Image (cartoon, rainbow, N blue to C red):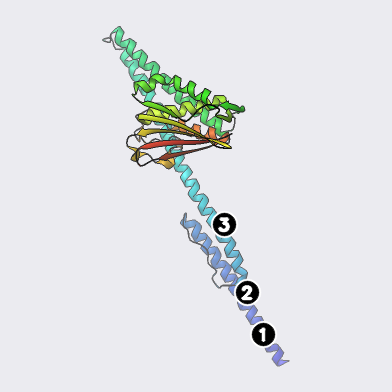
Amino acid sequence: MGILTIIMAVILGILLVRHYLLLNGIKQIRKQIKDIYEADGTNQQVTNPHNFSELSKLVIEINIVLAMNQKNHIYFREIQQEIKEQITNISHDLRTPLASILGYFELIHDEEATLEEKGQYLDIIEKRAGLLRSLLDNYYDLVQIDSEAQEFQMTVVDIKEVLTDVLATFYYDFIDKKMTIEIIGELDNLKVLADQALLQRIFINLIQNVLKHGEKQCEISHEKHERQVCTVIKNRVANGNRIEIEKVFNRLYSADKTRNTGNTGIGLTITKLLIEKMGHKIEAKLTKNGWFLIEIKWQI
């Protein structure tokens, strides 16, 4: 009986020590979790204080949750910063033409201004008001596309018909900017699955982007594959080193940090959203010899 009692006492002692260490381990893990959350943003992970197998799985699961939390923390911090930048940019984009309109209204009321000058001021006001309306329309379109309120009428569309109409619209703009435009490859029998009105909008946005940022030369080429049509629109750019190619489709991105060109960056954002929502792909590239490329892969 004496030996049995000793053995039972030893076993009980071991169990009590183990139980104490487990509780102590849990307590230390809780403290680690609290310290990690109070640190706010740390990559630190929880460790198993006493290497008990019972705690190992718990520690692994906790670290998975902590890693996901840290990832979400970084993501939402980036989103918050992006929202701040967008609000700043939208404010700047709207205030610039509005300030110009108010300034020219003051000039119109100047008693020393001639009728001819007042007429010129009214023309400028009309153009600035048109720009302001265009900006507001773009913001509205962006919200509509994001909310999936945009309805697509998908049909088989002839690229030649849409593209030639758009290029004809901007014919004099290319002349005024002294830019040449060259169509490479046959346009005949290039049919893709798209909403015709939105396809026109896409080409308008891309050509406007060429006119805003391009210089001297623009090339539009097409290649037809078995299940795909590839369209490449490329133009020469000055100061290509200022373009952050990975950001060109971001909302309100502009390589012109002063935003004095009137470019909000929304055009390319809307273009990408429309293309992808219709099931196609778009990519931007910048070559070392000064070409900016937009490549679209249309599904047939």
Q: CA distance from mark 1 to mark 2?
A: 15 Å
Q: Earlier in the sequence, mark 2 or mark 3?
A: 2
The numbered mark, 3 or 1, whose residue comes first in the sequence reads 1
Amino acid type, residue under disc 1 in the picture: Ala
- How far apart are the two marked residues, 2 and 3, measured between alpha carbons? 26 Å
Residue extending furthest right? 1
Q: Residues within 10 Å of mark 1 (few under 14, many from 20)?
A: few
Q: Residues within 10 Å of mark 2 (few under 14, many from 20)?
A: few
| Residue position for label 1 | 9
| Cβ atoms at labels 1 and 2 below 8 Å apart | no
Three-letter residue code for mark 3 = Val
Task: Identify the secondary structure beneath mark 1.
Answer: helix
The image quarter containing residue 259 is: top left
| Quarter location, residue 215 | top left
Against 274, is 176 above or below? Answer: above
Give the amino acid at mark 2: His
Residue 212 image position (x, y, % from top left): 38, 28
Secondary structure under tag 2 reads helix
Q: Nearer the viewer, mark 3 or mark 1?
A: 3
First in sequence: mark 1 vs mark 2:
1
Q: Which residue corresponds to mark 3?
A: 65
**Residue beneath the point at 52% across and 60% down:** 34
Front-most of residues 148 and 108: 148
Distance Cα–Cα, label 3 vs label 1: 41 Å
The picture quadrant where one finds residue 198 is top right
Q: Is residue 188 above or below residue 18?
A: above
Q: Residue at x 58, y 26 (%)?
A: 157
Tag shown at residue 19? 2
Disc 3, SS: helix
**Which residue is painted at 51% across and 63% down in the image?**
32
Between 252 and 17, the one nearer to me in the picture: 252
Observer-nearest of 10 and 193: 193
